[in-house]
Image (tube, grey):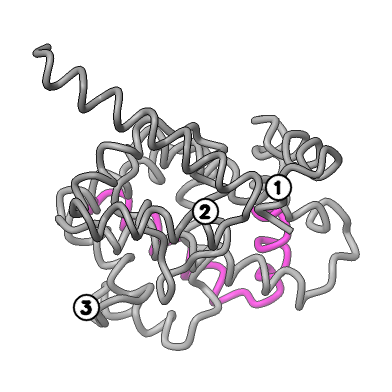
Amino acid sequence: MSTEEKTEMSLAKTRAQMIVTVLRYQGIDAAEQKLTEIAGQEGDQAIMEIAPHLSTAEVRGLTAEADIVKPSLLHAAITPEQFRGVFRRVGVRWSAAEHDDCPPEVLTDFQEELKQFLCAFILLQDEEGRQRELMKVILDEPHGPDALILGTIREKDFDEFIAKDGKITDVGDWREMLGLLPLHFPREWEWFKAVASGIINKKSEYREFVHEVAAEIYAVAVAEGAVQTIETEKADGLFTPLS
């Protein structure tokens, strides 16, 4: 590594630490504004260099309130490994899913949050190769394929999308995201169709599926230590990225 490359890496690491400090003491909006300033002065490449120096928890904190409509600059900059860690923390607020009497409207909120999460991280990648890479991360996770169904099955035209083998597309929404499956992951798409069709055709199983998968995603967040970390941060009064 050349001296110039070492200097650039050191600068990126210092900037990442600065962003985290702003996040902790000033909040998500201030941290995102700082990222915007850096991108405005030096281009998006500067954000790509900063992102690898952020921990999974820090990426999660910075993107917690962002979605496909109002994304964070980090959505297009994170590494697949960071995405894996952030996905495992997506259910940190879903403790209600542990309870059998979790209200349907609460489960619907979880589904919407999951859909926004998946669409933002996958569709905001500049290259289709990057989109495929992040989709592969989801498909390789134990509850990842189920999460894709959970986040989209309640959407209008979902059953028609399945019936037409994913040939209904719309740029920037869940159909474009799921369209990656028949195009690049045919074996996984066949599984997806079979499971989703079974749930659609047996309405009585719908809520059971939603509740069970939501609870499993929350359990993963607990296992990752994400829930305990968030509670500690709230108690310390440092920052509340998920409040």
Q: Quadrant of residue 2?
A: top left
Under circle 1, the secondary element is loop
Under circle 3, the secondary element is loop
Under mark 1, the amino acid is Phe
12 is higher (above) or lower (below) than 93:
above
Cα separation between marks 1 and 3: 43 Å
Q: Which label was assigned to residue 188? A: none
Q: Dot 2 surroundings within 10 Å: few (below 14), some, or many (20 or more)? A: many
Question: Which residue in the protein does label 2 denote?
Answer: 146
Residue at coordinates 88% horizontally, 55% vertically from top-left? 99
Cα separation between marks 2 and 3: 21 Å
Q: Position of residue 43 (x, y in %)?
A: 18, 54
Q: Is residue 146 left or right of residue 95?
A: left
207 is higher (above) or lower (below) than 213:
below
Q: Position of residue 222 (x, y in %)?
A: 73, 36
Residue numbers of the magenta segment:
185-214
Residue at coordinates 66% horizontally, 65% vertically from top-left? 110
Question: Which residue in the protein does label 1 denote?
Answer: 239
